[in-house]
């Protein structure tokens, strides 16, 4: 007889087992905290050197040299952005959403770093300002800028709805990267990876642990600011879900553009050096 979930009786000490206290998986106290004062001081007299408008339901690439800042800015209306980052000279080194989550938690804000994939595992960017810092966690456990979602994609959409939709963030990022590198879409698609969900408000439902989204609190003028720790290639998709209050992967939500601004400081932050790749030997033992 096949047992359904929840049909097995609980052990007698079930409550005692549940009462065991959690410990933080990856305490980050051993890491030198980012010198936010030095990053902030480097903004003094900086110059805006470029900007890129990301059209709704589409994506654009942008390059950020190490030592420069970039901002993702809300313009016109509430809009969620899906961010990919690569090392400018090596698409194999890319943003590692899962390890960033393990190190900094489910949602990122000022002072958190965006870590790169193995075997590189170094900070690619540091978040230096977040105008949505005030949101914190709401009564549902929701917060903004998550690293728990992946990105909306046409494969999951096909799986769940049986239909094709071509302007999911995954497809937008694929098209933008293919265009930027002048390479075929099928060649660059594997480089598209799990994102930082900029401005998206998400969490997990209590009890069932399901991934939820709710209307983003972002308003025009809000921004998330990053410092590029290494030479970066970025791609940002303006999600077809708009503020992601109802659904994604369709053309029904109100969508707005996003703005990416690039700033070059007069001098790098005091004491800053670009991080080298992780120093583990890569031997993996016998
Ligand atoms: Zn999306």
Image: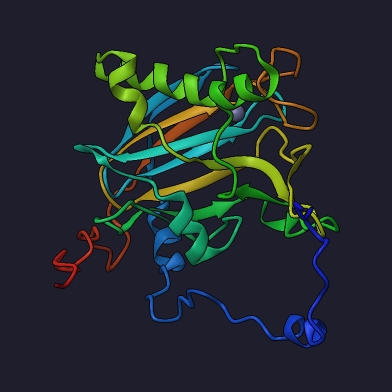
Horizontally, is 227 left or right of 66 in the view?
Answer: right
Give the quadrant of residue 9: bottom right
Q: Is residue 137 above or below residue 30?
A: above
Outermost residue toward the front in this view: 1
Q: Is residue 248 above or below residue 1?
A: above
Q: Residue at x 81, y 61 (%)?
A: 6
Residue in front for this viewpoint, 283 or 34: 283
Horizontally, is 19 left or right of 193 in the view?
Answer: right
- Where residue 1 appears, x then y in whole percent? 76, 53
Does any portion of residue 111 appear in the rendered image?
no
Horizontally, is 253 left or right of 146 in the view?
Answer: right
- Where residue 44 appears, x then y in whole percent? 42, 52
- Where residue 63 appears, x then y in whole percent? 31, 32
Does any portion of residue 213 appear in the rendered image?
yes
Give the quadrant of residue 212: top right
- Where residue 210 appears, x then y in whole percent? 74, 48
Q: Is residue 262 above or below residue 75?
A: below
Number of marks? 0
Q: Is residue 163 above or below residue 11?
A: above
Q: Residue at x 62, y 24 (%)?
A: 159
């Amino acid at each position: 007889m096949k047992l359904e979930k929840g049909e097995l009786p609980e052990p007698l000490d079930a409550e005692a087992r549940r009462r065991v206290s959690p410990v933080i998986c990856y305490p980050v106290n051993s890491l030198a905290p980012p010198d936010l004062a030095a990053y902030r001081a480097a903004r003094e007299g900086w110059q805006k050197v470029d900007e890129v408008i990301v059209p709704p339901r589409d994506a654009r690439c942008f390059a950020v040299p190490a030592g420069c800042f970039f901002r993702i800015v809300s313009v016109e209306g509430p809009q969620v952005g899906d961010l990919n980052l690569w090392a400018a000279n090596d698409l194999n080194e890319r943003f590692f959403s899962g390890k960033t989550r393990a190190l900094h938690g489910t949602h990122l804000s000022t002072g958190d770093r965006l870590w790169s994939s193995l075997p590189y595992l170094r900070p690619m960017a540091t978040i230096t300002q977040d105008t949505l810092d005030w949101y914190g966690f709401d009564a549902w456990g929701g917060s903004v800028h998550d690293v728990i979602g992946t990105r909306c994609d046409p494969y999951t959409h096909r799986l769940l709805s049986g239909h094709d939709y071509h302007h999911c963030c995954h497809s937008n990022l694929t098209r933008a990267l293919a265009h930027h590198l002048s390479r075929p879409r099928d060649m660059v698609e594997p480089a598209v990876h799990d994102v930082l969900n900029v401005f998206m408000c998400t969490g997990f439902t209590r009890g069932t642990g399901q991934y939820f989204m709710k209307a983003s609190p972002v308003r025009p003028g809000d921004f998330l600011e990053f410092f590029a720790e290494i030479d970066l290639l970025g791609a940002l998709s303006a999600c077809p879900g708009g503020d992601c209050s109802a659904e994604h992967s369709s053309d029904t939500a109100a969508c707005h553009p996003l703005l990416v601004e690039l700033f070059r400081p007069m001098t790098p932050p005091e004491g800053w050096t670009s991080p080298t790749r992780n120093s583990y030997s890569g031997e993996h033992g016998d």
